[in-house]
Image (spheres, helix red, strand yellow):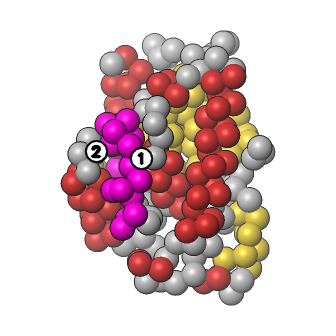
Amino acid sequence: MLQTVERQTGADPRWCVLWLHGLGADGNDFAPIVPQLVRPDWPAIRFVFPHAPLRQVTINGGMRMRAWYDIRSLSIDQRADQQGVRESMAQVEALIAREGERGIPPARVILAGFSQGGAIALSAALRREQALAGVMALSTYLPMAAQTPSEATAGGCGTPVFMAHGLLDPVVMLDLGERSRDALRAMGVPVEWHTYPMPHAVCPDEINDIRHWLDQRLHG
């Protein structure tokens, strides 16, 4: 089981937001966002921020860092290490199962991720037999795009997705985000798409839009 950082907004949480960080960061990266994000009228939420495993990352000279998968090439068709993606998906599934044991079923779990973390969030959610409450895919893309349509489930394709991308992103180019959005929509996934005048980051307007989207999930 991955180590995690946890923040609860109240006693006996009935919802969980499972949030995956980007390459080279760790679970502490997005924990400070919780007070900015939550509304006082929301039900109690457990925010879970796992630490990705340490692994060598090829495009960073083989340096060991926290990563959900190896990035072997800047070419999109060879970008993601498929074995690493599937291993991380399994680790996320274990965390979702743990939430079930703690009283929060998948239907009340929202899977979120930034950059690499978003790629895992999308990959895992689309392949689940039991749908999640939603996915937040921030500054990211859909890996293994060629295999995904045949591996995606009806529940996965019915899961609502919030996608956000920086217009000035030099790491995950906007075009890659747009192509991933279009691929998801072609599979019937309900995608809400937002762009912001920012680089590879998160901005206040995006946080406001995430809050509104989460409000619809929690009170829908």
Q: Is residue 166 magenta?
A: yes
Q: Estimate how packed mark 2 is, as few (under 14), some (14 to 19) or many (20 or more) residues with alpha carbons within 10 Å.
A: many
- The quadrant where residue 217 appears: top left
| Count of residue discs | 2
Q: Position of residue 24 (x, y in %)?
A: 66, 66
Name which residue lies at 41% across and 53% down.
Answer: 151
- Earlier in the chain: of badge 1 and badge 2, it is 1
Compared to residue 22, the image places residue 60 above or below, namely below
Q: Estimate how packed mark 1 is, as few (under 14), some (14 to 19) or many (20 or more) residues with alpha carbons within 10 Å.
A: many
Please say if the residues under marks 1 and 2 sit with CB atoms less than 8 Å apart.
Answer: yes
Compared to residue 220, the image places residue 36 above or below, namely below
Q: Is residue 208 magenta?
A: no
Residue at the front extreme, as displayed:
150
Name which residue lies at 61% across and 67% down.
Answer: 83
Disc 1/disc 2 C-alpha distance (Å): 9 Å
* Position of residue 176 in the picture relative to residue 116 (left or right): left
- The quadrant where residue 153 appears: top left
Magenta-highlighted residues: 145-168
**Residue 189 numbered tag:** 2
